[in-house]
Image (spheres, helix red, strand yellow):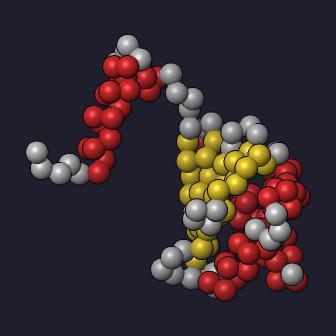
Amino acid sequence: MTALVTRDAVLPIVSVLADLRGGTVAQLVSGLPPRVTYSDRIAGFPTEDSKTVIAWLLAGDAAAQLARIAACFGDLAGTPVRIDVTDGVRIYFADGDIIHLRPSGNAPEFRCYTEAADGARAQELNVAAFALLRERILPAAQKG
């Protein structure tokens, strides 16, 4: 068998999962909670500013990080419950919303990816996260 294209390689896995649950792939998917993503970027955002923001959000231990994130995003997204720092800062909130902030790897840009139960909420999170970044987070991070 020749190698499958990455997206096509997922189909056998999903098919097995559906079979194990005793249903079809469509039934498996219909049982998942609705999730919608939205992404945008700030072009011309200096890489050094991106690094400053990420370092500031991740300063201290896990409790300090969550407290800082709650102070920044709590009014927008509620209580942060965990973060993943694999690629920037991916913040998981108690209600299921996600805000993922990261510098671009190849341009002076800052990116934001959001995930929510519907498209309007995902876009709202994204727009508001960028507003907070410009108005409060970057200035605070630059002050140290």
- Does residue 72 appear anywhere in the picture? no
Which residue is farthest left? 1
- In the image, taking residue 54 as reference, residue 28 lies left or right, namely left
Where residue 52 sits, quadrant-wise, is bottom right
Where residue 97 sits, quadrant-wise, is top right
Instruction: Give the tally of numbered discs.
Output: 0
Question: Is residue 142 depicted above or below 4 in this figure?
Answer: below
Foreground residue among 76 and 25? 25
Q: Which residue is drawn at 71% across and 72% down?
A: 54
Locate residue 109, reporting x and y percent: 58, 77
Locate residue 3, reporting x and y percent: 17, 51
- In the image, taking residue 65 as reference, residue 119 lies left or right, namely left
- In the image, taking residue 60 as reference, residue 83 lies left or right, namely left
Q: Residue at x 76, y 40 (%)?
A: 94
Q: On the rendered image, what quadrant is the N terminus found in? A: top left
Which residue is farthest top? 22
Q: Residue at x 62, y 84 (%)?
A: 47
Locate residue 22, reporting x and y percent: 38, 13
Locate residue 123, reporting x and y percent: 63, 50
